[in-house]
Image (cartoon, grey):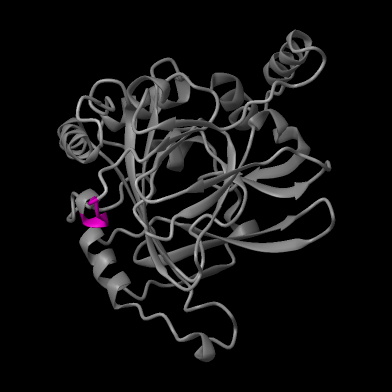
Amino acid sequence: ENIFDCKFFLCINLPFQLYRAALIHTHGGQLPERTLEIRQNCDGVDTLIYTAQHPILFKDCLNANTTVDDFLLFQQSRQNLFPPCGGKKLLRHFEFVSFRGDRKPIVEDVPCDTTTLGEKMEIFHRHQLPQPQQDVKGEYGSYIDVHIYMMNQHEKRQMEDRIGMLMSSSKKNLGLSQKMLATVMTVFLHAGRSAVYYLHSHMDHFLSFCLSEDGKTWVLIDPLYSDSFDSVWSGNAQVMLQELNPGIPRVMVKQEKGDILYVPPWWLHETMVKKTAKNIGFNIHFGVKGQIVMEITNFFFFRSDPSFFYSKVKQIKPEVYEKTVYENPGS
């Protein structure tokens, strides 16, 4: 984690190049194949999420009767990870160009709104999907909102107890309160498109809990191939702008209801969901001890400043990408 943090945040590429060269040397002249590992139920979920450098899909790790509502704790919480944007909806615009020259516009929704989770849920439930014959633009009533909340120690214990009750193996403890640093719950509310439909990466480990009957499909790329892309730090993630080399290995993952997917730091990822359905996603993002950036973020959280990293560390020039600011319809 520290090598990639150094690469992306300090723009010091040498440690990454040395690490990559050492891997190639010890694996017969080529990069090791770090691909998806599949485990049944919750086998190893309490330990591997802190050490594994490859993605792991824990099949059927949640009880069959688990619902979205089971995860929606802290209804009165307000996002505390980003500086508030004053009742506005802040968008950043990018474009991704594939190696073949295909272009895809990217609109990143900065989750800086400070309405409560409960208020966001109410607005989302009121949103109506159009019938296909009415959707002349093929956007299926596109809607996106994200609620991000860094939990305190008491809240982490509450979430830990709740998830423990929902897991198919009652003996497993994810370690939210004892092992995770700067632990963030993220709720994705989206319709007509995925919340993360473009390749990007970020510094934290995360667990994705699949709660939808329709499931979702992931595209994952090992960060060892990150130099095969031109990218930019958007203010809250490393966004891929251009694919420079052909044949970059992609790991395709089909995540079904009840599965938990673990993704290590800096793995490039995007998701695909059923466009004609409303979806709610839930993630837990966290750091580990020894990851310097996350240790710093955790320190400032206990100094009552959870937004320290995203407001003070490394920011983009707003005039370059922030092209649209409009009133949040829920405010």
Please name the predominant secondary structure of the magenta segment in the image: loop
* Residue 257 locus on image (x, y percent): 37, 51
Q: Is residue 229 magenta?
A: no
Is residue 41 or residue 90 the one in the foreground?
41
Residue at 26% x, 65% y is 121
| Left/right of residue 195 with respect to residue 296 in the rendered view | right
Image location (x, y in percent) of residue 62? 29, 42
Quadrant (top left/top right/bottom left/bottom right) for the C terminus:
bottom left
Coordinates of residue 316 in the picture (x, y in percent): 59, 47
Number of numbered callouts drawn: 0
Q: Is residue 331 visible?
A: no
Where 25 sits versus 263, above or below? above
Residue nearest the observer in this picture, 98 or 108: 98
Q: Can residue 208 be seen?
A: yes
**Left or right of 274 on screen, residue 288:** left
Nearest to the observer: residue 81 or residue 183:
183
Question: Is 190 on the left or on the right of 1, as rendered?
Answer: left
Q: Residue at x 21, y 24 (%)?
A: 171
> From the viewer's perspective, is residue 124 above or below residue 216?
below
Residue at left offset 24%, top offset 49%? 71
* Figure quadrant of residue 224: top right
Q: Which residues are magenta?
A: 65-69
Quick check: 159 left or right of 42?
Answer: left
- Residue occupying the far bottom of the picture: 134
70 above or below 223? below
